[in-house]
């Protein structure tokens, strides 16, 4: 063979180096994009549908990730009132996001990032920062192409950092909303950029029943499809959200007016549990249809675990009744992750957890109402902010301690359990949290030192995942069965270390601390049947089949006590 001259070798290397970038791009997996839009009204179930599509792909061995688009102008959900808009979900990396990320994490057992939630505020902030920097110098900055390009880049950058082949993007709001237009325009363009085979539009809309005729009505859905088309998006799949399974005639009508094949129309009807939705849609062939459309020849693998979990949710053997004492304001979504964590814990022991949402203010206005708590198997005090209703919560904690009713407190619930103990066991009159009473003579809960000078409210709490060290031979340790855990946080206040000695002397056990020992993370009272509270939010990491240990312990104790059994010993489980 003829030997290569030095010059030739140099040329070959040069060509290789020049082409590395090109080949690197070629070698990258082609990402496919599924977009979910909603029609007719909000709360039509886009979050559950998006999670269910993810689940149907997952059981076929695919590895999707999910993005939620929220067209509101807030930069993130952190500054929104949870009692009006639903819970603020917290990601591992400290993002304060829309609650739908919680559904994606629970259904798909993922750990999503702040980046997986995109808002109008965030997109505009990025573009305006670029404009101020001079990135667009000389040009007029416009919605198309600058805002739409930013949206597309954000979506694509999630694909890159997750190393995934499929990205599901849920567009929040309803088709036709003014705020949603730039996002819909961006996803419309993505079909041109990425190609037909790599993009799929799923549209879900309400198909109500008119009670006069008891008939399913498809007209609102047809109008929402037309609205989508007006923007330039022809859906590939339509999901009818109806109270019961739609008949063939109605299905054909939807297909005809939607200009899609009959096999591309599916029905998501009311189910006992949201966890049934992927199974319902999969049975109708939706998973197979999507895979076929995206060019995957994958068959369904094992979904036994999901099936078993669903069965224990819908056909439980036992039941416990829990009083959730909070600031409910009629919106159960304000505690959705907590509700689900209680469900996961119950499912692990074949138990249905019935939650009654009680306004804590009721105990302040009418103190005799507190006796009503005797009828519950457990008392749960959730997160919270501000003074309204805090005394009622403290009363409920006091009642559970005195009557030995199983108790679980989360975040604000943890802080108020410290206040209750300080007042009623340590004898510290008017002990309180600085958040509630700045002039308290015994501020047992104080602002964290690093929070003192923070004035701005957005994304400034102690957020996300932090390490916690558990004390051996405590309830917390027996529940987690390990010495170190990571849990998610969202707070500004904490146990005041000046009161640590007296609290401990009187019997309060802090069984979990931050790694430096300066932050109290879990408290427990060993003489009670079950009395535990955590500064962190175990609910954000609770999953079907993998309940959060604190929630599991609580529900297990509620059931044991209800059945008249001795208090459960967790290390022997
Ligand atoms: N308001 C309390 C704090 O900021 C508790 C927060 C919460 O319950 N998430 O520390």
Image (cartoon, rainbow, N blue to C red):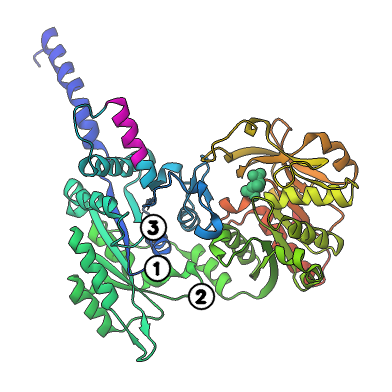
Residue 509 picture location, percent across and down: 82, 45
Asked whether mark 3 lies closer than 8 Å to ligand 1, one says: no
Which stretch is magenta?
124-134
Q: Residue at the far left: name it.
A: 2
Query: Of circles 1 and 2, which is in front?
Result: 1
Name the residue rendered at 65%, 76% in the picture. 317
Element on which disc 3 rests: helix
Image position of 566 (left or right of 232): right
Quarter of the image with the C terminus in it:
bottom right
Q: Label 3, label 2: how many angstroms apart (C-alpha)?
A: 20 Å
Q: Is 467 situated above or below 320?
A: above
Q: Is 270 situated above or below 278?
A: below
Q: Is 150 situated above or below 187?
A: above
Query: In terms of depth relative to the viewer, which is nearer, 572 or 31?
Result: 31
Residue under label 3, please give it. Answer: 54
Q: Is residue 472 visible?
A: no
Residue 44 bears which disc, if any?
1
Residue under label 2, please give it. Answer: 272
Q: Mark 1–mark 3 contact, CB under 8 Å?
A: no
Residue 286 picture location, percent across and down: 32, 67
Q: Is 152 situated above or below 134?
A: below
Q: Assign the magenta stretch its main secondary structure.
A: helix
Query: Of circles 3 and 2, which is in front?
Result: 2
Work out whether mark 1 precedes mark 2 in sequence or the reverse, and give the earlier one: 1
> What crowding class fits label 1: few (fewer than 14 Cα within 10 Å), some (14-19), or many (20 or more)?
many
Q: Is residue 128 magenta?
A: yes
Q: Is residue 28 visible?
A: yes
Q: Label 1, label 2: how many angstroms apart (C-alpha)?
A: 16 Å
Q: Mark 1–mark 2 contact, CB under 8 Å?
A: no
């Amino acid at each position: 063979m003829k030997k290569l001259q030095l010059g030739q070798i140099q040329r070959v290397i040069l060509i290789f180096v020049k082409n590395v970038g090109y080949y690197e791009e070629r070698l990258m997996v082609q990402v496919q994009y599924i977009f979910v839009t909603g029609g007719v009204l909000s709360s039509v179930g886009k979050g559950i549908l998006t999670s269910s599509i993810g689940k149907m792909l997952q059981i076929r061995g695919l590895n999707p990730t999910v993005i939620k688009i929220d067209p509101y102008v807030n930069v993130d959900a952190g500054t929104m009132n949870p009692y009006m808009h639903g819970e603020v979900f917290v990601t591992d990396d400290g993002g304060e996001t829309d609650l739908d990320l919680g559904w994606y994490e629970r259904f798909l057992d993922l750990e999503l990032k702040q980046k997986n939630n995109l808002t109008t505020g965030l997109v505009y902030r990025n573009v305006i920062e670029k404009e101020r920097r001079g990135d667009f110098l000389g040009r007029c900055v416009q919605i198309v192409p600058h805002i739409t390009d930013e949206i597309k880049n954000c979506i694509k950058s999630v694909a890159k950092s997750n190393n995934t082949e499929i990205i599901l993007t849920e567009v929040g709001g309803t088709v036709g909303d003014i705020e949603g237009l730039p996002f819909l325009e961006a996803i419309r363009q993505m079909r041109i950029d990425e190609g037909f085979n790599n993009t799929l539009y799923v549209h879900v809309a309400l198909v109500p029943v008119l009670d006069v005729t008891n008939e399913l009505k498809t007209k609102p859905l047809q109008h929402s499809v037309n609205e989508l088309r007006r923007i330039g998006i022809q859906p590939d799949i339509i999901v009818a959200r109806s109270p019961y399974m739609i008949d063939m005639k109605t299905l054909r009508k939807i297909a005809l007016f939607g200009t899609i094949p009959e096999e591309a129309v599916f029905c998501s009807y009311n189910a006992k549990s949201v966890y049934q939705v992927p199974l319902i849609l999969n049975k109708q062939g939706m998973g197979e249809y999507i895979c076929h459309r995206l060019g995957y020849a994958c068959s369904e693998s094992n979904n036994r675990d999901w099936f078993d979990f669903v069965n224990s949710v819908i056909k439980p053997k036992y039941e416990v009744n829990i009083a959730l004492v909070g600031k409910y304001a009629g919106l159960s979504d304000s505690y959705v992750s907590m509700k689900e964590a209680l469900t996961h814990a119950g499912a692990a022991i074949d138990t249905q957890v019935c939650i009654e949402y009680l306004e804590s203010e009721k105990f302040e206005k009418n103190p005799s109402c507190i006796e009503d708590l005797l009828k519950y198997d457990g008392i749960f005090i959730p997160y919270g902010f501000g003074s309204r209703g805090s005394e009622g919560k403290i009363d409920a904690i006091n009642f559970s301690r005195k009557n030995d009713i199983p108790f679980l407190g989360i975040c604000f619930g943890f802080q108020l359990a410290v206040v209750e103990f300080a007042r009623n066991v340590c004898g510290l009159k008017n002990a309180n949290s600085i958040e509630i009473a700045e002039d308290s003579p015994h501020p047992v809960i104080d602002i964290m030192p690093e929070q003192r000078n923070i004035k701005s409210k957005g994304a400034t709490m102690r957020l996300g995942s932090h390490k916690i060290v558990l004390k051996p031979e405590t309830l917390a340790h027996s529940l987690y069965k390990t010495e170190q855990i990571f849990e998610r946080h969202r707070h500004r206040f904490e146990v005041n270390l000046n009161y640590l000695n007296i609290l401990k002397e009187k019997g309060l056990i802090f069984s979990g601390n931050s790694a430096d020992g300066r932050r109290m993370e879990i408290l427990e009272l060993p003489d009670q049947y079950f009395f535990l509270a955590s500064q962190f939010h175990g609910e954000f990491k609770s999953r079907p089949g993998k309940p959060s240990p604190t929630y599991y312990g609580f529900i297990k104790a509620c059931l044991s006590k209800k059945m008249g059994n001795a208090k459960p010993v967790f290390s022997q489980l």
